[in-house]
Amino acid sequence: MARIDFYILNQAGQHSRQTFACRLAEKAYRLDKTVHIHARNRADAERLDELLWTFRDGSFVPHERLGDRGGPVESPVTIGCEGDTVEARDLLINLCDDIPGCAEAFPRVAELVTSDDDCKQLSRRRFATYREQGHSLETHNL
């Protein structure tokens, strides 16, 4: 079973989730972990691609969007959405409203929860599903 970490953010909005996803991906990269960030759609994946270059001065997180080119993926951080073929990595950062089908291939999943009521409600549903599946759950209030 996977370890699922719910990060409860004090901020609202999708941009807060995406910025924290970048910080988390950078931390994992510095720990020599591979990461996949699963976006809600192609437009969000494009925003994350840009944000990984700009979210913090001096940061460098080598990454690539899935589906941008054919061939094997060599970057330690990938960004994709439903419909992309996702290889197993050390960490899945889920930015979707539901649990992606690829989640079962990851030993660790990060769920990012903003202070928005709809985000909290959808996260509670994912939490209950993970618990029913027998995963190890941790909550981090930030």
Image (cartoon, rainbow, N blue to C red):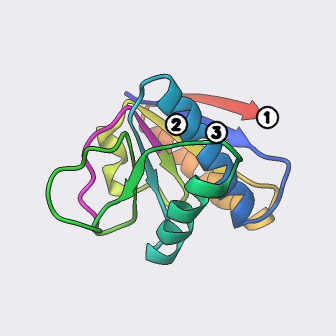
Circle 2: element type: helix
Q: Nearer the viewer, mark 2 or mark 3?
A: 3
Rendered location of residue 8, percent (x, y): 75, 43
Quarter of the figure that contains the N terminus? top left
Indicate which disc, 1 or 3, sits on the residue closer to the N terminus. Answer: 3
Q: Residue at x 16, y 50 (%)?
A: 72
Residue 49 location, x and y as percent? 50, 62
Pointer 2 or 3: first along the chain: 3
- Residue 38 is labelled as none
Give the numbered dot on residue 141. 1
Q: Is residue 23 left or right of residue 120?
A: left
Q: Quadrant of residue 134?
A: top left
- Packing grade of label 3 (10 A; few <14, some 14-19, many >=20) is many
Q: Can you say which quadrant of the picture contains the C terminus?
A: top right
- Does residue 86 appear in the picture of this structure? yes
Q: Amino acid at mark 2?
A: Arg
Q: Nearer the viewer, residue 24 or 11?
A: 24
Q: Residues within 10 Å of mark 2 (few under 14, many from 20)?
A: few
Q: Is residue 86 magenta?
A: yes
- Measure the C-alpha gap from mark 1 to mark 3: 8 Å
Type of the residue with mark 3: Phe
Res 120 quadrant in image: bottom right
The image shows residue 108, relative to residue 12, as above or below, that is above
Distance Cα–Cα, label 2 vs label 3: 12 Å
Q: Main secondary structure of the magenta part?
A: loop
Q: Tell me the number on the disc at residue 131.
A: 2
* Res. 40 visible in picture: no
Identify the residue at horizontal 43%, vertical 74% (top origin). Answer: 42
Q: Which residues are magenta?
A: 84-92
